[in-house]
Each structure stands twice: as C-alpha cells, then as structure tokens.
C-alpha cells in the first residue's frame, strides 16, 4: 500500500472572511526579530486553518506566502475583582514570506 500525497487545492477566501481571520499583528520583541528573516506574526481567529491564513495574508497585503506556522496560546487564570476568571485562548500565526517580500506593520 503506497501513501500518496493529497493534491493541494487553492483556497479562495472572501474579503470579509479575510478580515475576520486576521485579528491583529503581533508586535513583540521576538516577532520583530523574526521580521528580519522575512517572518511576520499575527493573532488570528482560533478556528482559522493554515490555508485560510495564507489566503488572507496574500489577499490583504499583496505578498507571496511560503509557509504558515501556528500555535494556540492557552489563556491564563487570573483574579478579576477578587474572583477567579480565565482569559480566552488565542491563536498565533507566524507567516514566512517569499524572498524579497515585506509587510510594513508600522505604516509609512
């Protein structure tokens, strides 16, 4: 029995869905260091998949994406007005851009 790779299907996404997928850019010291290597970090919707994130970044910023890595950050338990509460989970996406591509997050 051979294992054949599944054919890649181009994911198309509407502009509204793209704006719902990308929540905000992640601006931290570590994310800024990755920006020197052609990587940009975003906080994305918790239900977003890698193909959806890739399609959204390519549509919104007009760049070519080579890879998308994601991680789910679990929310901390914190006290809120003396009662225990829990912050919501978030999903972080590290998007690697093609050679020579860049996204200016600070605006010009």
Image (cartoon, rainbow, N blue to C red):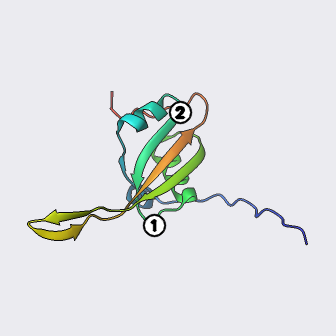
Mark 2–mark 1 contact, CB under 8 Å?
no
Instruction: Classify residue 17 by image quadrant.
Output: bottom left
Residue 22: percent from the left, percent from the top?
A: 41, 53
Q: Is residue 82 left or right of residue 74?
A: left
Q: In this view, does 1 lie to the left or right of 40?
A: right
Q: Is residue 108 left or right of residue 70?
A: left
Please tell me whether residue 61 is drawn above or below residue 52 in the rendered image. above
Q: Residue at x 48, y 34 (%)?
A: 34
Please tell me whether residue 39 is drawn above or below residue 3 in the rendered image. above
The front one of 10 and 45 is 45
Residue 59: percent from the left, percent from the top?
A: 50, 48
The front one of 75 and 92 is 75
Circle 2 crowding by C-alpha within 10 Å: few under 14, some 14–19, many from 20? some
Q: How far apart are marks 2 and 1 (CA)?
A: 25 Å
Q: Name the residue under label 2.
A: 38
Residue 1: percent from the left, percent from the top?
A: 91, 72
Q: Which residue is drawn at 71% across and 59% down?
A: 8
Q: Which residue is drawn at 83% across and 64% down?
A: 4
Q: Residue farthest to the right?
A: 1
Dot 1: element: loop
The front one of 94 and 23 is 94
Residue 78: percent from the left, percent from the top?
A: 21, 63
Instruction: Classify residue 64 by image quadrant.
Output: top right
Dot 2: element: loop
Q: Earlier in the sequence, mark 2 or mark 1?
A: 2
The front one of 59 and 32 is 32
Q: Name the residue under label 1.
A: 47
């Amino acid at each position: 029995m051979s294992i054949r790779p599944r054919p890649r299907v181009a994911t198309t996404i509407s502009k509204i869905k793209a704006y719902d997928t990308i929540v905000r850019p992640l601006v931290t010291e570590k994310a800024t260091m990755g920006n020197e290597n052609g990587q940009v970090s975003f906080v994305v919707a918790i239900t977003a998949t890698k193909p959806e994130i890739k399609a959204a970044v390519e549509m919104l910023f007009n760049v070519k994406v080579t890879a998308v890595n994601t991680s789910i950050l679990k929310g901390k338990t914190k006290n809120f007005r003396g009662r225990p509460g829990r912050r919501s989970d978030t999903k972080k996406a590290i998007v690697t851009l093609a050679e020579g591509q860049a996204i200016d997050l600070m605006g010009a």
